[in-house]
Image (cartoon, rainbow, N blue to C red):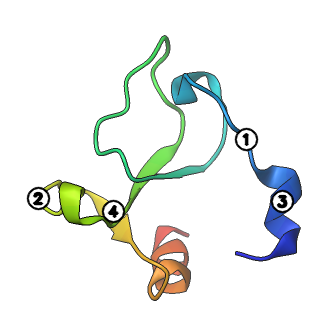
Amino acid sequence: LGSDWVSRLILTKDKTIVRGEVLVDDNPTIVGAMVPSWIHVLFEQPYNAGAAGHRMNWSTWRQCFAALR
């Protein structure tokens, strides 16, 4: 996503405590201490192929984010 995103990157064990607009993750099931405020976008991987919801990969990330606006 480029160097502009480095300052926006957050690493945490409980992703539900982070406020934001979009979470891109390869895990189709996000659980934690809070109800998430963000839209979950699933980064496509072979092991999550059957999961429902917003999906993206390196070829489609721009179209995915444009559709979420």
**Dots 3 and 1: beta carbons under 8 Å?**
no
- Please report the residue visible at 22 percent of the width from the left and 56 percent of the height from the top: 48
**Dots 4 and 3: beta carbons under 8 Å?**
no
- Quadrant of the snapshot with the N terminus: bottom right
Residue hosting label 4: 54
- Please report the residue visible at 54 percent of the width from the left and 34 percent of the height from the top: 37
> Could you tell whether 19 is left or right of 55 in the image?
right
- Please report the residue visible at 30 percent of the width from the left and 64 percent of the height from the top: 45
- Quadrant of the snapshot with the C terminus: bottom right
Question: Which secondary structure lies at badge 1?
Answer: loop
Of all residues shown, which one is farthest toward the top?
33
Question: Which secondary structure lies at badge 2?
Answer: loop
* Cα gap from disc 2 to disc 3, whole angstroms: 30 Å
Residue hosting label 1: 10
Residue hosting label 2: 50
* Cα gap from disc 4 to disc 3, whole angstroms: 23 Å
Q: Which mark is residue 6?
A: 3
Question: Which secondary structure lies at badge 3?
Answer: helix
* Cα gap from disc 4 to disc 1, whole angstroms: 20 Å
Q: Name above or below for residue 28 compared with residue 32.
A: below
* Cα gap from disc 2 to disc 4, whole angstroms: 12 Å
- The amino acid type found where label 4 is placed reads His
Of the residues under marks 4 and 3, which one precedes in the sequence? 3
> Could you tell whether 40 is left or right of 13 in the image?
left
- Badge nearest the viewer, 4 or 1: 1
